[in-house]
Image: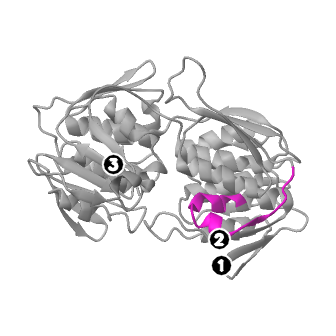
Amino acid sequence: MDKIRIVGGNRLDGIIPISGAKNAALPLIIASLLTDERLTLENMPRLRDVSLLTRILSNHGADYSLNGKRPGEDHLAGQTIGLTAREIVDTRAPYELVSQMRASFWVIGPLLARCHRAQVSLPGGCAIGTRPVDLFIAGLEALGARIDIVAGYAMAEAPGGLRGARYVFPKVSVGATHTLMMAATLAKGETVLENAAREPEVVDLAACLVAMGAKIEGAGTSVIRIQGVDRLHGATHRVMPDRIETGTYAMAVAMTGGDVTLTHTSGDLLRAGLDVLAATGTTIEETADGLRVARDPAAPIRPVDVVTEPYPGFPTDLQAQFMALMSRANGTSRITETIFENRFMHVAELARLGAHIAIDGRTATVTGVPRLVGAPVMATDLRASVSLVIAGLVAEGETTVSRVYHLDRGFERLEEKLSRCGAVVERISGEGMR
C-alpha cells in the first residue's frame, strides 16, 4: 500500500494548475446513461473514482474511450472521455461495484428514467457519516417509481415511465439533487424540485443536460424546474474547475507562507471559503486565469471561527484542511461541522503531529501551536488525507501518510503539483516498503 512522505519546512512558490472537479465529473459520467448517443466530457481529472465509475458504467453497457495528453501539452492537463450507452444491457448495479463508491448509487435515476427499472445496491464509500439514501428514494417515488429495499438492494420500477411532480427535499442534498434532476429530464410533464442543492456542480450538470436537449431552469437556486422530453442526444461538455482542490491548495500556501498562482480556476466558485482564508491574513488576488494566493511567513496566522454549510456557505469538504491551518494559528478557533456527523476523524491524526484540538459534539476547538512535529499518520477519508499532507508541509522532520488510496480518489497527482512549488513530498510505493 502506497504512502506519501513529506519533509516539512519549505514554503510553496510557483504555479499549480487546478484540475476538473471530481464532484462535477461523477454525475456527468452517469448522465451518459440517459442517451444512446455519445457524450464527450473534456477536462476530466485523472482520478481513481473517475476510472472506477467508467468501469461501473461499462457493466450497464456503456462504451468509453480516453484521450489524454496531446503533443506540447502539460501532462497535468485534463483528459477527454467519450461515453456511449447505445443500449443498456443490464439495469442491475451490484454490491461489489456500488460498495466501492457511493456516487455510483446515482445510476438509479437515469436507469429508471430510460429503462423504467433498476436494481441498485445500497452504497458504501467514505466513513464520514450515514449519508442515507432515503431522500433519493422518496424523490423517485414522488416521480412515480415503486421502490422496495430487498436484501440490500433498491428494487425500483416505473411502469410506463416516470411522471413529473413537485418534490421538496427535507434537507439539502447534492447527490439527491443530481439524481432527481437527471431522472426528471425524461419524465412526462414538469418536475419542480424545491430546497434543491445550489452547488456549482449542480449548475454544471444542468448545463450538460441542457446541451443534451433537456429543459431545465433554476439550477443554482433552491427551486429547479425540469420539463421532461422524449429523448436526449449526445453533446460535448467541459468539466468545471475543482473548487475544493482550489481551496485545498490555497490553504496549503497559507500554511507554508508561500506565493502561488492557481490557474484554470475561479474565485467565484469558492467565495465563502476564500473570504474565510483572507480573514486569516492570507492575500488572495484574482488573475486572468485563476487566483494568486500569498501569505507573509513572518506574519502570524489569525484564528477564524467557521461553520460548515451547504453552498454558498463554507464547504464541509474544506473543513479538515482548514483545521490543519488553524492548528498553527496564533490563538483559538472553533470549527463547527453541520453536514456530516463523523467528519472529525482526522483530529486524532493531527494530534499525532502536535495539534491541540478538543471536540465537543459537532464543534472542534483548535488552539494554535508554534510548531508541529512530523510523525507517521493514517488517512481516514479523502479530505482528511489531504489535511495531513498540509500539516506535514510545515511539520518539523518527516511525516508519512498511509492509506493514501483515499487521496487518489480526489486529488490528481498531488505530490507532483506540490513538488513543482518547492515542497519535499514523494510517493513511496507499497512494493518499495516491503
Image vertical order of residue 335 relative to residue 230, above or below: below
Q: Position of residue 101 (x, y in %)?
A: 57, 60
Q: Which residue is mark 1?
A: 152
Q: Tag 3, which secondary structure?
A: strand
Mark 2 nearby-residue class (10 Å; few <14, some 14–19, many ≥20): some
Q: Tag 2, which secondary structure?
A: helix
Whether residue 307 can be seen here? no
Q: Position of residue 338 (x, y in %)?
A: 39, 62
Q: Which residues are magenta?
A: 87-107
Nearer the observer: mark 2 or 3; the answer is: 3
Q: Which circle marks residue 4 in the picture?
A: 3
Which amino acid type is shown beneath numbered disc 2?
A: Tyr
> Which quadrant does the N terminus fall into?
bottom left
Residue plotted at (21% across, 42% down): 7
Q: Which residue is mark 2?
A: 95
Residue plotted at (66% across, 45% down): 28
User: Any magenta on residue 423?
Assistant: no
Residue closer to the observer: 346 or 216: 346
Tell me, yes or no, whether the two marked residues, 2 and 3, touch with CB atoms within 8 Å. Answer: no
Q: Position of residue 369 (x, y in %)?
A: 10, 51
> Which quadrant does the C terminus fall into?
bottom left
Q: Residue furthest right?
A: 160
Whether residue 119 can be seen here? yes
Determine the image quadrant of residue 167: bottom right
Q: Tag 1, which secondary structure?
A: loop
Tell me, yes or no, whether the two marked residues, 1 and 2, touch with CB atoms within 8 Å. Answer: yes
Residue closer to the observer: 181 or 301: 301
Disc 1/disc 2 C-alpha distance (Å): 8 Å
